[in-house]
Amino acid sequence: MLRAVSVLCGESQSFLLYTTARRDAYKLFRNTYASASTSSQRPRKIKKYRTTVLTSEASQASHSPSVHSPPPAQSSPPPTPPSQSPRRSWTVAAALALTASVGGIYFFRKLSEEEKKIISSEDAPKKNVGPVRTPIPASADQLPRHVQFLLVGAGTASFAAMRAIRSQKPDAQVLMVGSEYQLPYMRPPLTKELWREPDLDKVTDLDSLTFKQWNGRVRSLAYEPSAFYTPVEQLEERGAGCGVARGWAVRRLDVARRRATLEGAGGTHTLTYDYCLVATGVVARRSAALAGARGAGRARTLRTADDVTQLAARLAGGDVQRVAVLGGGLLATELSAALAARLKDTGKTVLELYRESSPLASILPSYLAEEAARRLQEAGVTLLPEADVVDSIVVDDKVLMRLASGAEVEADYVVECVGTEFDPALADASELEVHPELGGVVVNPELQARPRVWAAGSAACHWAPREGRRRGGLHDHAVTSGRRAGDNMLADMLGTAPAPYTHPHMFWTDLGPDLGYEAIGTIDSKLKTVGVFSEDAVTELRAHAAAAGEGDAGGPGEGAAGAAVRLEGGAAGGRRYERGVVFYLEGRRVVGVLLWNLFNRMHVARQVLAQAEFEDLFEVAKLFALHEDE
């Protein structure tokens, strides 16, 4: 009897969930959020979705938000039936329990086929997305027992270290160990050029991925083809070469004994090494508010080439008409522009939503952040600023995201680009120091963490002469720090002096075919900035030329008025900026340089950072030839 009643209770909860109308589910969703948030948050004005969207005229009409009406009041429960005798009551209860359990199961299964599922962030099922692949090598007994150089991670930093080692010692024996199932490849095209490939959604062999560069040349995403590498199972026998163990992960380093424990689908293996580099990179940060969408297979991160091909295949399907990109940083804005270009003329749209007032607001002065927003809108991206997603559910195969303002945003699919974070599992298991705030393995100026153990790329928290402790996370830093670590590992083997890592961090990005910028050093919008732009590249600014040049870091040079315009901080927003240079300052010292639609001038920016202090930044800007496109 008790078992029958328990089954009835369990089924009746699901039965009520799926027979509730869509609006009743939303009432529950709203009430739950309101009760949890009103006690801990100050009263605030509720913003409507329509008033917060910055959109182009072409897409404004097609993306008006849905207005959800309050659900109708539910009828009161039926009155309690009159009491009966105990014996008869038990008989009736047993009959009712048996009938209700059987009938409830039948109706639940029947209605589950007819009604659409409602999935919240609390009860979302977990789904495994993506093909099942076999590691290379397939079994642990094919891995070597000892290697000279063990590179933990098979990304850009490890590849750069391997290049540095083997260029000076061709007979070196190197093993790269990576959790991904493809050969080492470059990551910047994942949010830019790769999306221009027409057959991206049909790719099955990730090692065959190619993309077209800005100069029209076709390039492989992988750094080298498979023929370049030595098969892992032959590495120990040959004694020289570089092998890549794919689909394997190093779980622990025994630094004192120079041992590493590897784990994969093919088993567990322990090997010894002479020198080790930790270059595991970072993992994509997940938004807790999108747990419901993820559980329903309607949200994903974009960190690997496999993520790209799976997202491309999903967007090619007919069930995704609107894709939302969550985040306002570099990767989110790059991806939004790339997706808008790919989906142009397909009837499908791209929405980018972020907490800040403008995209890239954390790195650009406000007038350039606003310009970036305009460029994204012109590319066909719908923008939703000041959007803090606090929860999500999936209704009728639509992701409904709840904002802190009370507004609701709908999309068919969501891509999470909310940053990255360092996974300390290997470092903790290996007793390597991890920086408590910045993350990453703490290393000395030579990138060494422990005896015969180095770290590079975004896994390393290194010391910079001017900035102090920092952890880089972009491509250029991975290349240069990996190369330096490889040089220093070899220097330790040869008994020569290691060199410190002093390379300033540099990055580049594209927002469509007409806007790109490069930056080096500390690029932070909280710093004071001085921007100098060619006058012919700034529209509607002629009337303000006489007012330009006020500030502490020097004004226009004599006779230069009308040739260039200088902007301080966030001034002069609302105008179009085509070409210029922005200096980021700490006091009077230049700590960062951003080149807005200026290319092939990074060598000048490095010289400016090296000298750092100048009397007149307007004169310094002339070194960048602002009036020349190239």
Image: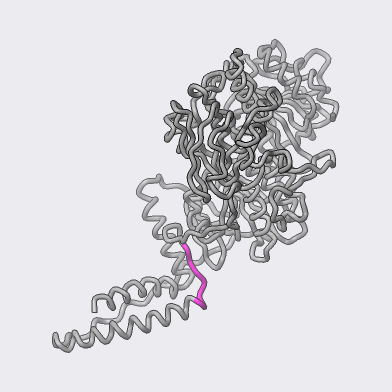
Instruction: Give the residue displayed 65% in from the left and 30% down from the top.
Output: 162
Q: In this orientation, does residue 219 appear?
A: yes
Residue 360 horizontal side relative to residue 342, left or right? left
Taking the image as shown, residue 349 lies to the left or right of residue 289, namely right
Residue 397 percent coordinates (x, y): 56, 66
Q: Nearer the viewer, residue 434 or 626?
A: 434
User: In the picture, which quadrant includes the N terminus?
Assistant: bottom left
Question: Could you tell me which residue is drawn at 48 percent across and 59 percent down?
Answer: 126
Q: Can I make out residue 187 in this image?
A: no
Query: What residue span does the magenta drawing correspond to?
Result: 113-119
Image x and y of residue 308, in percent: 66, 50
The residue furthest left is 86
**Does residue 371 sit above or below 495 in this rendering?**
below
Viewer-nearest residue: 80 or 226 = 226
Nearest the camera: 446 or 368? 446
* Number of numbered discs: 0
**Outermost residue toward the front in this view:** 237
Residue 40 percent across, percent down from the top left: 37, 46
Q: Residue 241: which quarter of the image? A: top right
254 relative to 196 in the view: left or right:
left
Residue 81, x across and y down, in percent = 23, 85
Quarter holding the C terminus?
top right
User: Who's the residue at 80% across and 41% down the image?
Assistant: 213
The stretch drawn in magenta includes residue 594: no
Looking at this view, is 106 or 28 the one in front?
106
